[in-house]
Image (cartoon, helix red, strand yellow):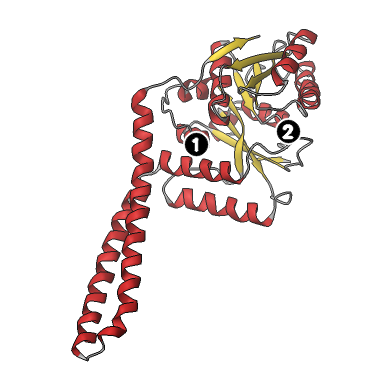
Amino acid sequence: MSTTPAPSASSASAELRKPPYLLVVVPCYNEEEVLHSSAGILHEQVATLVDNGDVAANSGILFVDDGSKDSTWRIIEELHEQDGTMFHGVKLAHNKGHQNALLAGMTYAYDTGVDAIISLDADLQDDPNAITTMVNDYRSGAEIVYGVRDNRDTDTAFKRGTAVMFYKVMNALGTETIPNHADYRLLSRKALAALMQYQEENLFLRGIVPSIGLPSSKVYYKRGERQAGESKYPLHKMVSFAVEGITSFSVRPLSIITGLGIVSIIVSIAMLIYTLVSVGNGHAVAGWGSLMCSLWLIGGLILISLGVIGEYIAKIYIEAKHRPRFIIEQAI
């Protein structure tokens, strides 16, 4: 594990920030198989930070139950009963998806007066040992600390390839993202306050957080294997997440559609010239294949264009209703 240095503005001062009141925000959806184990590991991490004086004594862990159908919430209640200072819980009234559950936890933590939060998934594939380095970077002046994977050795070749393609596409479309960074990050209270100003329904935190622009650093870690249970991000969810990110942060696909339309017109003109030449030479039948290809090309471009435009219209429709992004049913 390694880290980039904290911002130079803060490093100029030898005095560290005071130990923060920290909450580790953990979104959970059907995580009964890993929750006890993850809670024990995170408890040890936070307790060590408290003992070393790196975080405030009331720091702890906030589990966010995203409408789980198993015994996840019951386990969170049991953990709270065992140690009410360390373990806290928020239960959403309905499954709202990973990003909204994460935002719900951040919002609840912000309302409790935290100095900083660290978000990570319940399966702890993201190395929890990086928490200490994140806190150190925060105390040195960073407002945002990104957890970044130093390799993708645990991924399949397909997942590695699609991940690289995703980040390249996002950057090409003008969206600032941190390659190999998921949702493992530290946000200071100042960064949380800035995040609360973003009101869009279609959340893509990996794009929103870098756009905040506050001083930041990176902590590199090795991603581990999932301890138990199944991944909550199968292929169809990853594709949906990628589409969400692209359409939430870039209008460039609409410009691409315009470009495709121009190309289509040029191809059509070329095919018209080819057809006229074929008729003049008495080979009209020979142009039938080219004509059919042109029709398929134009039809495909129209359908793709309508689909992309439809994605944006659907997001406008959702945003216009101003529905709550999450509803907290219970908090402990």
Question: In the drawing, does residue 235 fall left or right of residue 194?
Answer: right
Above or below, 301 relative to 189: below
Instruction: Please tell me the numbered disc located at residue 238.
Output: none
Q: Where is residue 112 shown, x and y percent of the image?
A: 58, 10
Question: In the drawing, does residue 71 fall left or right of residue 90?
Answer: right
Element marked by disc 1: helix
Query: What residue is at 73 percent from the left and 15 percent from the top?
Result: 74
Above or below, 324 relative to 244: above
Residue on which disc 1 sits? 210
Mark 2, other Cα within 10 Å: few <14 / some 14–19 / many ≥20: many
Q: Where is residue 149 shown, x and y percent of the image?
A: 67, 44
Residue type, label 1: Pro
Q: Residue furthest bottom?
A: 281
Above or below, 4 relative to 46: below
Q: Where is residue 232 shown, x and y percent of the image?
A: 65, 36
CB under 8 Å between discs 1 and 2 = no
Asked whether residue 186 is in view, the answer is yes
Query: What residue is at 29 percent from the left and 84 percent from the top?
Result: 285
Query: What residue is at 77 percent from the left and 42 percent from the top?
Result: 225
Q: Quadrant of the C terminus?
A: top right
Mark 1, other Cα within 10 Å: few <14 / some 14–19 / many ≥20: some
Element marked by disc 2: loop
Q: Where is residue 212 shown, x and y percent of the image?
A: 46, 31
101 or 217: nearer the eye?
A: 101
Q: Quadrant of the N terminus?
A: top right
User: Mark 1 to mark 2: distance in Å?
Assistant: 23 Å
Q: Earlier in the sequence, mark 1 or mark 2?
A: 2
Residue on which disc 2 sits? 124
Above or below, 258 relative to 314: below
Q: Which residue lies furthest to the front in this view?
A: 285
